[in-house]
Amino acid sequence: MKFIYKLTATALGSGYSPFAPGTAGAIVGCLALWLLEKYNLISTTTTPFLFISLIIVTTLMGIIATDKLEEEWGKDPSKVVLDEVIGMWITMMFVPLTFLNVLIGFILFRFFDIAKPLGIRKLESLKGGVGVMADDMLAGIYANIVLQIILYFI
């Protein structure tokens, strides 16, 4: 069962990247969005209920997996990158998936995730997997708001 927790928390192993595992996790999030859209499984714009449901289920899986691995890996280990996947998905909610939109969303999300302004850092203090997921979710919300504003004016 631990293997499943590790596979989940590391976003299919991308968290083991020796260089910028958080960025690797966000890229996995982008690739997953592209695949879901390409094969008409879930869309960020035309099936928002399914997309939001996917975010909720994946978040719960991330919380459980992180809680199970915390004793072995410590608090908020860099290998846990499912939170980056979720943050990237939230960034792209209700946004058409074009290459440019995903690129801008990726840059915005990574900025908010790394800089942690506007209360994002405070969420890291929440206990266990909730704290690990919550700060990236808020970073995704901020990135989504800024992206929506950019798209409105362009």
Image (cartoon, rainbow, N blue to C red):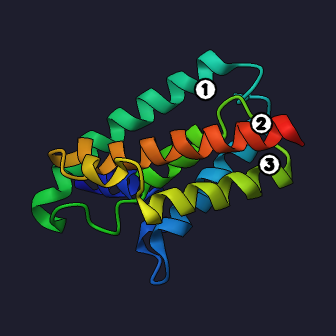
Mark 3 — residue? 101
What mark, if any, has residue 37 been given in the picture? Answer: 2
Instruction: For marks 1 and 2, give the CA distance.
Output: 11 Å
Q: Position of residue 18 (x, y in %)?
A: 45, 83
Q: Position of residue 128 (x, y in %)?
A: 17, 48
Residue at horizontal 59 percent and vertical 46 percent from the top: 143
For the residue carrying disc 2, how many other residues have a C-alpha within 10 Å: few (<14), some (14-19), or many (20+)?
some
Q: Judging from the image, what secondary structure is the residue with disc 1 in?
A: helix
Dot 3, how many residues are within 10 Å of its Cα: few (below 14), some (14-19), or many (20+)? Answer: some
Can the viewer see residue 70 in this picture?
yes
Residue extending furthest left?
Answer: 71
**Residue 12 shows in the view:** no
Q: Quadrant of residue 145?
A: top right
Q: Position of residue 80 (x, y in %)?
A: 35, 60
Residue at point 66%, 20% (across, down): 48
Distance of label 2 from label 3 (alpha carbons):
14 Å
Identified at 75% across, 58% down, the residue is: 103
Q: Amino acid at mark 3?
A: Asn
Q: Is residue 62 left or right of residue 42?
A: left
Residue visible at 14% across and 45% down in the picture: 127
Q: Which kind of residue does numbered mark 1 sit on?
A: Phe
Image-quadrant location for residue 130: top left
Residue 51, labelled with which disc? Answer: 1
